[in-house]
Image: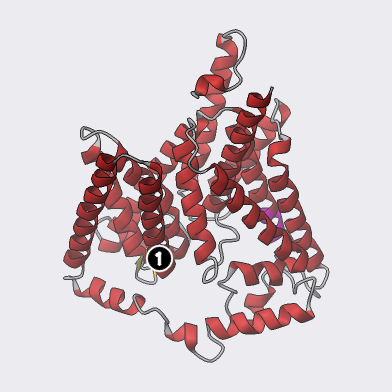
Amino acid sequence: MTSAALPAPATFQPQRAAISLIASLGVAFGVFLSGFVINEPAPYEVYFAALIGIWAIFGLRLSRHIAPLIGLYIVFNIGGMFSILTMEEVNDTPMYMAVSLFLAFTAMFFAAIIEADHRRLRLIYRAYLAAAIITALLGILGYLGAIPGGEIFTRYGRAMGAFQDPNVFGPYLVLPALYLMHGLLTGTLKAAPLRAIGLTILVLGVFFSFSRAAWGLLAICMMLLVLTMLIKERTGAFRLKILIMTLIGSLLLVGAIIVALQFDQIADLFSDRAKLVQAYDGARLGRFERHAIGFLMAMEHPLGIGPLEFGLMWGEDTHNIWLKALMDYGWLGFVSYLVLITWTLVLGFRFLLRERPWQRYLMLAYIVLVGHTIIGSVIDTDHWRHFYLLMGIVWGCIALEMRWQSDLRR
């Protein structure tokens, strides 16, 4: 079937179409702002707080198809509010919970507007790509010292672009990198040079972030994309094209890294960051030991110990989203988060390869979400804005598929 099977207005209304276009462009601009989070609150939060409020006044619809996303995120945040009750001094935790709830609302918002019009996905991805290219260039040029004042785009000698942390900057670039990679594998030769340049910039951004989680995420997602496309595309010629282009791309990537490693500064940092276990991971009271201590603490504190308390107690935060959920949101938050992630991945997998107008957008977001779920065991993704965007995209596409199936049964 084609996109014509989707519900459409009976008559064309120019005024309504113009309003819808302006609204979609407004969303795209908000997504673009997600690439620039040097200070908090960032322009992203301020803008989306206003946009969601305006949209709610003029007709934001939350359908039953995204009810699990809404319900489980609300329960998750209720768990965090209960956790605050266990604290002697709340300090900045109410603001932390306010941000958590706001980001959950952004996921619901993205899901709702995508369900309302799947064409918004293209604008969202392109806006995300533009932001990623710009922030990656800032990180790369800052790292190389190629622009005046470029040190503000680095931290600990690592590129971080217009972010506060290289460990967020690197993973942020992965979805647009996959978007370009998919375009290279399926698009025309005419557009290939620009996509190849863009992909090179994003991959270098990930590399210069020197984030092991980002490196692993990019590698996992690229392999999953190739595997998914080999399964999806049944013709031998197309599969051969994918394999050849993947091989060429891998060789070029390895070559670029080898060239970069000829510079002592890069080679030294790479050799240090490439170690699977760092000194602060395996040392006494290092990351892994803190994980074990935290999970034991969860047995004694079913309501959690309060947002951010673990970091204050042990000198460093959890660096594990599952432990983060237990410590900051209690067992109620942990169970709701686990159910939400499982529900999302199971439903998304069911709909992953169905021929729909939104299939490639679902496939890319789903693969990157799987990657984020994997790296969540060694890093905290709780307040990553792009993670909530991923959740919104996947649930928006799930809702579109459910509407599609409902229309077929009528």
The way the protein has been coloured in the rendering is secondary structure
- Residue under the point 82% across and 73% down: 86
Q: Which region of the structure is painted magenta?
A: 96-100
- Seen in the picture, residue 180 relative to 162 is either above or below; the reply is above
Q: Is residue 197 visible?
A: no
Amino acid type at mark 1: Gly
Quadrant of the image occupied by residue 211: bottom left
Q: In terms of image quadrants, where is residue 67?
A: top right
- Residue located at (74% from left, 60% from top): 94
In the depicted view, which residue is nearer to us: 51 or 215?
Answer: 215
Please tell me whether the stretch drawn in magenta is mainly helix, strand or loop: helix
- Residue 302: x and y in percent read 79, 73
Residue 323: x percent and y percent?
Answer: 64, 72
On screen, residue 158 versus residue 113, left or right, reads left
- Label 1 Cα neighbours within 10 Å, binned few <14 / some 14-19 / many ≥20: some
Does residue 400 appear left or right of residue 84 in this picture?
left
In which quarter of the view is residue 179 placed?
top left
Q: Residue farthest to the bottom?
A: 284
Picture coordinates of residue 1 (x, y %)? 50, 24
Report the front residue among 73 and 137. 73
Residue 89 colored in magenta in the image:
no
Q: Return the x and y of residue 262 as percentages of the image width and height.
A: 16, 70
Residue under circle 1? 216
Residue at 60% across, 52% down: 346
| Residue 97 on the magenta segment | yes
User: On screen, 39 above or below 34?
Assistant: below
Can you see residue 318? yes
Q: Is residue 133 left or right of residue 403?
A: left
Could you say whether the residue bearing mark 1 is in a helix, strand or loop? Answer: helix
Which residue is at a point 34% across and 75% down the rendered structure image?
Answer: 274
Figure quadrant of the C terminus:
top right
Work out whether residue 26 or residue 329 is closer to the camera in this orientation and state it: 329
